[in-house]
Image (cartoon, helix red, strand yellow):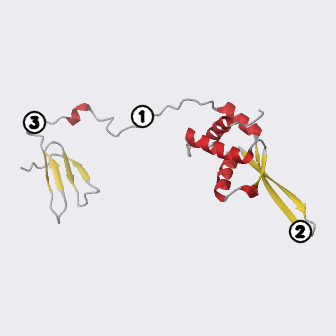
Amino acid sequence: MGIITVDSLSLAIRNGIDESRDMAEEEAHMLAHHVLNFFGYSDRIIDNVLEPEDRDAFYMLEDAGILTTEREETTLYDGREWRIHYWLFRRERINKLLEEREEAPVQEAEEASVYDDLPDDIWRRGGEDQRWTSSHTSTGPASASWSGSWTVRSGNPGAPSWRRGPGPARP
């Protein structure tokens, strides 16, 4: 691979970022463009040119294996040690990420609903013997019953208790 392009780096970023972050294509493209603005045609940049927000993005790409760091130590004329930190592209990892998942279409699974397992006739209203009645008071517990086969009684409306049996029909 010669020059790293915005499109190739964008695809590598999308393939390298774990699924929990689920980076959108446009966001990956903007990040790739931003990163390449620092590197230009070089494989290495000095860390001092980065702002803290940029450095955070570089650390994220380091976690994905796209970037790595190295440091160089040198002795100054007055005898002090000076460290210079660099960011580098990991070209072999970028190539591997480009080959890994070439824009496979993502199929969204249908969300399962709690109502899917209920029979269709549950939604139909019955005759006179199956009527729903309820009574509520502003200070006492709410009580409601269905004259069919279920009764709901609860002192706390947020946590009802269910019991099987014929409930008293209320007019």
- Amino acid at the residue labelled 1: Glu
The residue carrying mark 1 is: 110
Q: Circle 2 — which element?
A: loop
Distance from label 1 to label 3 (Cα)? 35 Å
- The residue lying at 78 percent from left, 44 percent from top is 43
Say above or below: 153 vs 96.
Answer: below
Residue 159 occupies quadrant? bottom left
Circle 3: is it few (<14), some (14-19), or many (20+) Cα within 10 Å?
few
Structural crowding at the residue carrying mark 1, measured as other residues with C-alpha within 10 Å and reported as few (<14), some (14–19) or many (≥20): few
Front-lying residue, 25 or 49: 49
* Residue placed furthest toward the bottom: 78
Location of residue 91 by image quarter: top right
Kindly tell me whether residue 56 is visible in this rendering: yes
Q: Is residue 18 visible?
A: no
Residue 35 in the image: x percent, y percent? 68, 46
Describe the element under mark 3 as helix, strand or loop.
Answer: loop
Q: Secondary structure at mark 1?
A: loop
**Residue at mark 3:** 127
Amino acid type for the residue under numbered disc 2? Arg
Tell me which numbered mark, 1 or 2, is placed earlier along the sequence: 2
Above-or-below relation of 164 to 83: above
- Quarter occupied by the N terminus: top right
Q: Which dot marks residue 80?
A: 2
